Image: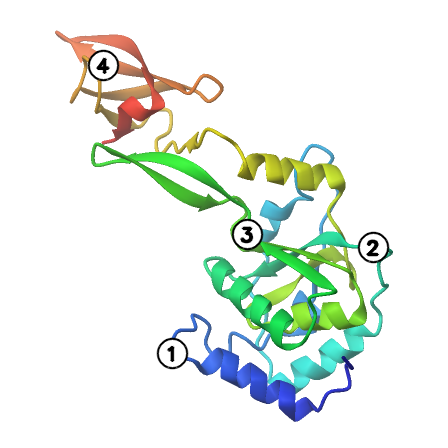
Amino acid sequence: MSLQEPQEQFEHEMEQDTSTDDSPLSDSDAHLPSSESDSVSVSANEDSPLPDIPDLMDKPAPVRVSSTERLSSSSEESSHIEPSDGPGWYVIHCYSGYENKVRHNLEQRIETMGMKDMIFDVVIPTQEEIEVKDGKRRTVERHIFPGYVLVNLQLTEESWYVVRNTPGVTGFVGMGNNPTPLRPEEVSQIIKRMEADAPTVKVTYKVGERVRIVDGPFNDFRGLVSEIDMERTKVRVMVSFFGRETPVELDFLQVEKA
């Protein structure tokens, strides 16, 4: 595949992808400037399973430009990409809530543009989470890093171009113009969280907030949260008995926000 494809063909493709009725992205949302969002800079953090990815969610929304300006800038940027020695996991940024749409768009482009031998997998890191709402317990799937998608690829100008120009993608995570691959230990941490046997418990209340006990001998009692122990998944609630505040230790799932 050559990068010197007719510009009109790409513009037509972008307009089709962003003008369908089921697309959550408006036509103007899909055209984003390379100068501000092609590569999102991060700082290294040895203690974090990902290189400060959650901190990037506060990045200002990019200014919208025309498709002609975007494609021209993308072509110039791709010429400065340093090819990788082998496959690696890279992080791309997208609009929060549109992760599934971006993955669908990218997988379609990989198929139609014959890039299966260079772009191998597209993953949205998720994990199961238990939450209690209206006294009912339910398991939901939560995105570990909202607004981010992982892509396993062999980095070249061609693969960069296909991913970067996918509708909804606002840029790669990396330093300067070159995307930065995740370290093997970072990938292992993410996979470990995704494959965890027991789902995590979502805590919707904070210390000092009023909660209602929904299970056990103190069912339907109300009180104030005095302590939350994340390691033991326990919460201590101050409950009033005959005018006296008494601490009661409960499981996370026995309490919900009042």
Please state which amino acid type lies under the numbered disc 1. Asp
Q: Earlier in the sequence, mark 2 or mark 3?
A: 2
Which residue has dot 4 on it? 239
Q: Percent x, y for residue 60?
A: 57, 61
Q: Residue at x 68, y 42 (%)?
A: 187
Q: Give SS at disc 2.
A: loop
Front one among 1 and 235: 1
Q: Is residue 221 visible?
A: yes
Disc 2 marks a residue whose amino acid type is Gly
First-in-chain label (1 vs 3): 1
The residue pinned by badge 1 equals 21
Instruction: Give the label, 4 or 3, closer to the camera.
Output: 3
Instruction: Quote the CA–CA distance across marks 4 and 3.
Output: 42 Å
State the separation of the CA atoms marked 1 and 3: 24 Å
What kind of residue is marked 3? Answer: Ile
| Residue density around tag 2, few if under 14, some if 14–19, many if 20 or more, within 10 Å | few
Q: Which numbered disc, 2 or 4, marks the residue closer to the eye? A: 2
Q: Which mark is residue 124?
A: 3
3D distance between C-alphas at marks 1 and 2: 39 Å
Q: Where residue 169 sits in the image (x, y, percent)?
A: 59, 66
Tell me the CA gap for discs 2 and 4.
59 Å
**Alpha carbons under labels 2 and 3: distance apart:** 22 Å
Which residue does the image show at 57% across and 84% down from the upper left? 13
Residue type pointed to by label 4 = Val
The answer to whether residue 27 shows anywhere in this view is no
According to the image, label 2 marks what residue? Answer: 86
The answer to which image quadrant residue 91 occupies is: bottom right
Q: Is residue 57 left or right of residue 46?
A: left
Q: Quadrant of the C terminus?
A: top left
Bin the neighbour count of mark 3 within 10 Å (Cα to Cα): few under 14, some 14-19, many 20 and up.
Answer: some
Where's residue 186, x and y in %? 69, 39
